[in-house]
Image (cartoon, rainbow, N blue to C red):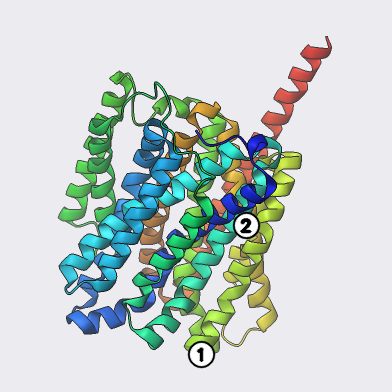
């Protein structure tokens, strides 16, 4: 376990938060910075788009498969110790990717880099939750996710600058000195002792989890351009479904399972995970399609296109700490309700986009999306944590984020097929209608949960006074 927050001086606590936020920031930065380098990588290795997509696909697969495992390894071997191991793995694989001489080696390093990124994502939040007092937890998570949002935002811009100045290898090599800085902030603050009687790691369960997730993720990228399900896609979905059923059966009989499926018996935890998945579907689909629609409406240069997207991510980064603060004060569910209402309003406004429209309409729609995103990201994690005992917090985070990433990938694939079927105008409008409907469903789910929590607290207060 990490050092309790009451034992940490203020300066040490600031160092810890800075180091952990920087580590998590790098994971988010690496998620988007590589996209800008793909054309240069293709020229270097004479690779086409079909070959280059594996640079991103393998990273996402590894990220999804290793988040729950990272949480459990942290519980068994110590979260601080595993955080440092994740930093080392991420640094070594970044160095290897930056010095690689061929596409096969690059793909291997990206696969391993995804595993290191899973550790940074999962353990950064888990360590903050363990150290920060519960009354300030929402604000700390809000700050962490605001930094993550900046990483996602700066990735394409930083990638373009680095590739133009130093070549594509620099987008990987830049991680090494920044990870050293992150480690220097955390060193001596994060406790690296191994917990006593922590049990063992269920590797068999993890292998079945991999056998479940990998076919599903592969199926999402093997859909035909028209959206028709091919034999390969159908076979992959069957394999993933059978493996998933087997995983559940095995884990229920395992004394120390990798995944505590009993968590899903908790209605509030299920709903928190659902809202996290809905958020991932929304921003993954919208962020992919918004640039294409903007280019059609305004015919922007690449530089101006990046600036047009800033209202989303900058507003999200500003709102995230505020959402955490109000989540601490009023509970996460009311904040989540407001967040999904903002997302629905944004999607409906975006469905009205036409060529030559006023710029203020575009900025308003994107700002509403930023407000909704920022109001959901941190509070959804806080809602999931509030529904489970503290001993399961790390596993709950890993499970929630695995579903979050999986939902984003699958939702992105479905939205792409809808967009292709309808074309630039109608397709974009159809996707936005779908996202608005999902956001409204999320708002109703959050509102129902807020009422349920309020009623439970009222009953508890009545019993204590009686």
Displayed quadrant of residue 90:
bottom left
Question: Looking at the image, which is closer to me, 396 or 221?
Answer: 396
The label nearer to you, 1 versus 2, is 2
Query: In the displayed image of the protein, which residue is found farthest to the top?
Result: 466
Q: Residues within 10 Å of mark 1 (few under 14, many from 20)?
A: few
Q: How far apart are labels 1 and 2 at the CA level?
A: 29 Å
Question: Looking at the image, which is closer to me, 232 or 323?
Answer: 323
> Is residue 375 at all visible to an observer of this figure?
yes
5 on left or right of 296 = right
Q: Position of residue 40 (x, y in %)?
A: 29, 83
SS under mark 2:
helix
Q: Residues within 10 Å of mark 2 (few under 14, many from 20)?
A: many
Residue drawn at (24%, 72%), measured in percent from left and top?
Answer: 99
Quadrant into which the C terminus falls = top right
Tag on residue 144?
none
* Tag 1 residue: 299
Q: Position of residue 400 (x, y in %)?
A: 46, 41
Between discs 1 and 2, the one toward the N terminus: 1
> Is residue 440 at all visible to an observer of this figure?
no
* Tag 2 residue: 374
30 on left or right of 328 = left
Q: Position of residue 274 (x, y in %)?
A: 50, 42
Displayed quadrant of residue 173:
bottom left
Q: Position of residue 166 (x, y in %)?
A: 36, 84
Query: In the displayed image of the protein, which residue is found farthest to the right?
Result: 465
Residue drawn at (16%, 73%), measured in percent from left and top?
Answer: 102
Q: Is residue 227 above or below residue 311?
A: above
Residue drawn at (57%, 50%), measured in percent from left and top?
Answer: 16
Question: Looking at the image, which is closer to me, 303 or 459?
Answer: 303
């Amino acid at each position: 376990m990490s050092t309790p927050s009451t034992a940490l001086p203020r300066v040490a606590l600031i160092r810890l938060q800075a180091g952990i936020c920087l580590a998590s920031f790098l994971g988010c930065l690496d998620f988007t910075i590589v996209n800008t380098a793909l054309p240069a990588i293709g020229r270097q290795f004479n690779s086409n788009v079909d070959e280059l997509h594996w640079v991103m696909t393998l990273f996402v697969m590894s990220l999804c498969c290793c988040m729950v495992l990272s949480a459990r390894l942290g519980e068994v071997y110590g979260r601080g110790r595993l955080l440092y191991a994740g930093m080392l793995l991420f640094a070594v694989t970044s160095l290897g990717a930056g010095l690689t001489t061929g596409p096969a080696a690059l793909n291997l390093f990206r696969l391993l880099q995804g595993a290191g990124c899973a550790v940074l994502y999962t353990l950064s939040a888990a360590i903050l939750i363990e150290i920060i007092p519960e009354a300030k937890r929402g604000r700390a998570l809000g700050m962490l996710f605001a930094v993550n949002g900046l990483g996602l935002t700066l990735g394409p811009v930083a990638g373009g600058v680095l590739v133009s100045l130093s070549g594509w290898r620099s987008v990987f090599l830049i991680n090494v000195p920044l990870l050293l800085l992150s480690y220097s902030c955390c060193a001596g603050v994060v406790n690296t002792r191994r917990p006593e009687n922590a049990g063992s790691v269920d590797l068999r369960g993890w292998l079945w989890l991999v056998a479940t997730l990998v076919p599903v993720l592969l199926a999402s990228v093997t859909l035909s351009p028209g959206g028709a399900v091919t034999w390969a896609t159908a076979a992959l979905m069957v394999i993933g479904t059978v493996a998933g059923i087997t995983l559940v059966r095995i884990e229920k009989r395992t004394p120390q399972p990798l995944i505590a499926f009993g968590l899903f018996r908790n209605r509030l935890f299920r709903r928190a995970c659902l809202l996290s998945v809905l958020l991932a579907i929304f921003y993954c689909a919208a962020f992919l399609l918004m640039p294409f629609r903007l280019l059609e409406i305004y015919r922007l240069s690449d530089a101006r296109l990046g600036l047009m997207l800033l209202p989303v991510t900058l507003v999200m980064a500003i709102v995230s700490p505020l959402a955490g603060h109000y989540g601490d004060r009023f509970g996460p569910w009311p904040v989540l309700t407001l967040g999904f209402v903002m997302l629905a309003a944004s999607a409906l406004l975006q469905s009205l986009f036409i060529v030559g429209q006023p710029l203020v309409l575009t900025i308003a729609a994107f700002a509403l999306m930023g407000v909704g995103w920022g109001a959901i990201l941190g509070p959804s994690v806080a809602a999931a944590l509030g529904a489970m005992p503290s001993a399961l917090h790390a596993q709950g985070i890993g499970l929630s984020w695995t579903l979050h990433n999986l939902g984003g990938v699958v939702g992105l694939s479905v939205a792409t097929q809808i967009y292709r079927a309808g074309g630039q105008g109608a397709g974009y409008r159809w996707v936005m209608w779908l996202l608005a409907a999902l956001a409204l469903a999320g708002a109703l789910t959050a509102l129902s949960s807020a009422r349920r929590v309020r009623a439970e607290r009222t009953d508890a207060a009545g019993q204590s006074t009686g």
